[in-house]
């Protein structure tokens, strides 16, 4: 038999009452049942815990040792139970959002939106270039929601137990320095970029293949492609090393202009994902709504995208 908390409580009750009869009454047990339980405890511990006499019971040396330990263990367990109950109540009352996303302004805009509508919520973020990694984190339960994306109509990443909802679809723009021949107002024909080198942010989807196919349709094969972080991409564009490929929501940046491509040969679909078995319906509705509003906030910060949308009466 293994010693349990109820056994320690019985030993404490016997010591406090001074007799098996009074302890049994305090514990709501029959005296023979408590006596039998005490014998089983003593056999498990390897010795007698109480000496019985005409005036009741008195703890033996072994009994004193067990009682001394019980004075530490029982209050600690009670405190643990109380603290766990308080934590559970607090966790139910306070929302927690563990958000993942690819690098870009949309993730920050969603955090800002959630902070406005749920000011007491705890929000953490995890950024990754890999949509597959974000999907894996959702599947493993290490993220609550993930902002990922796909090129055009490509299938979203991850397993069947993940739900993906579209936040918005954006055209892909080119990014060039002010003064570049392609920086003039209006759309840029992809064929006019045939002699350029390129830069984009990395990913594990099909964007690279889709870009190469779009160039082939325009009659050329693209030269070197630099895959790098956003800051380095901007630097390569600013110094004239490459023409950047960016989502139309890329915010206005000093020394840089973004221009739409004629015919919109490339698009990017923003997706919000979650695990279907771990999120409540009302929570997913809230986060999806705020993600769509966040996208509108980000889109409004791009002058070229605002003009492109206005010209096509896109809301």
Image: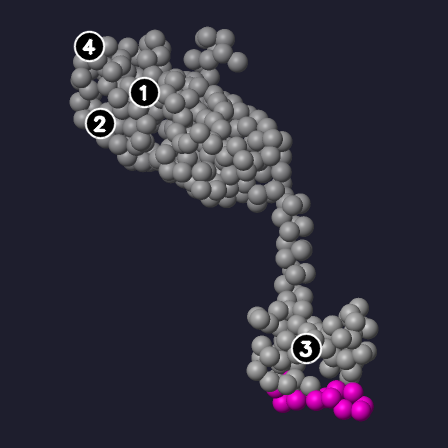
In terms of image quadrants, where is residue 248?
top left
Sequence-earlier tag: 4 or 1: 1
Within-10-Å neighbours for mark 4: few <14, some 14–19, many 20+? few
| Total marks in image | 4
Residue 183 lies, with reference to residue 237, above or below; the image says above
Task: Check residue 4 for magenta coloring.
Answer: no
Kindly check if marks 1 and 2 are in contact, taking CB atoms under 8 A apart as contact: no
Neighbours of disc 3 within 10 Å: few (<14), some (14-19), many (20+): many
Looking at the image, residue 220 lies above or below residue 228: above
Considering only order in the chain, which callout, 3 or 4, is on the residue closer to the N terminus? 3
Q: CA distance from mark 4 to mark 1?
A: 18 Å
Q: Is residue 21 above or below residue 284?
A: below
Residue under label 4, please give it.
219
- The residue beneath circle 1 is 174
Q: Foreground residue, 88 or 311? A: 88
The disc, 2 or 4, on the residue closer to the chain's N-terminal end is 4
Which mark is on residue 102? none
The numbered disc on residue 225 is 2
Checking the image for residue 38, the label placed there is 3
x 47%, y 32%: residue? 161
- Whether residue 258 appears in this view of the structure is no
Structural distance between the alpha carbons of marks 2 and 4:
17 Å
């Amino acid at each position: 038999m293994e010693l349990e908390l109820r056994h320690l409580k019985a030993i404490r009750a016997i010591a406090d009452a001074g007799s098996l009869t009074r302890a049994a009454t305090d514990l709501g047990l029959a005296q023979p049942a408590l006596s039998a339980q005490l014998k089983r405890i003593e056999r498990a511990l390897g010795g007698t815990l109480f000496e019985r006499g005409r005036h009741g019971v008195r703890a033996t040396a072994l009994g004193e040792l067990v009682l001394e330990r019980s004075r530490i263990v029982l209050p600690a367990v009670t405190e643990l139970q109380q603290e766990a109950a308080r934590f559970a109540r607090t966790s139910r009352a306070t929302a927690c959002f563990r958000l993942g996303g690819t690098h870009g302004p949309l993730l920050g805009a969603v955090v800002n939106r959630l902070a406005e509508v749920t000011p007491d919520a705890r929000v953490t973020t995890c950024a990754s270039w890999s949509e597959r990694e974000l999907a894996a984190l959702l599947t493993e339960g290490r993220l609550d929601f993930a902002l990922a994306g796909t090129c055009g109509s490509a299938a979203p990443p991850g397993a069947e137990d993940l739900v993906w909802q579209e936040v918005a679809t954006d055209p892909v723009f080119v990014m060039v320095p002010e003064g570049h021949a392609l920086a003039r107002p209006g759309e840029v024909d992809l064929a006019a970029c045939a002699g350029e080198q390129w830069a984009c942010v990395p990913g594990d989807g099909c964007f690279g293949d889709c870009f190469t196919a779009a160039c082939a349709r325009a009659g050329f094969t693209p030269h070197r492609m630099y895959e790098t972080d956003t800051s380095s991409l901007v630097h390569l564009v600013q110094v004239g090393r490459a023409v950047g490929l960016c989502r139309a929501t890329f915010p206005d940046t000093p020394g840089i202009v973004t221009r739409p491509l004629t015919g919109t040969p490339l698009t990017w679909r923003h997706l919000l994902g979650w695990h279907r078995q771990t999120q409540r319906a009302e929570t997913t509705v809230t986060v999806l709504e705020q993600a769509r509003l966040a996208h509108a906030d980000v889109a409004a910060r791009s002058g070229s995208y605002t003009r492109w949308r206005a010209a096509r009466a896109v809301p």
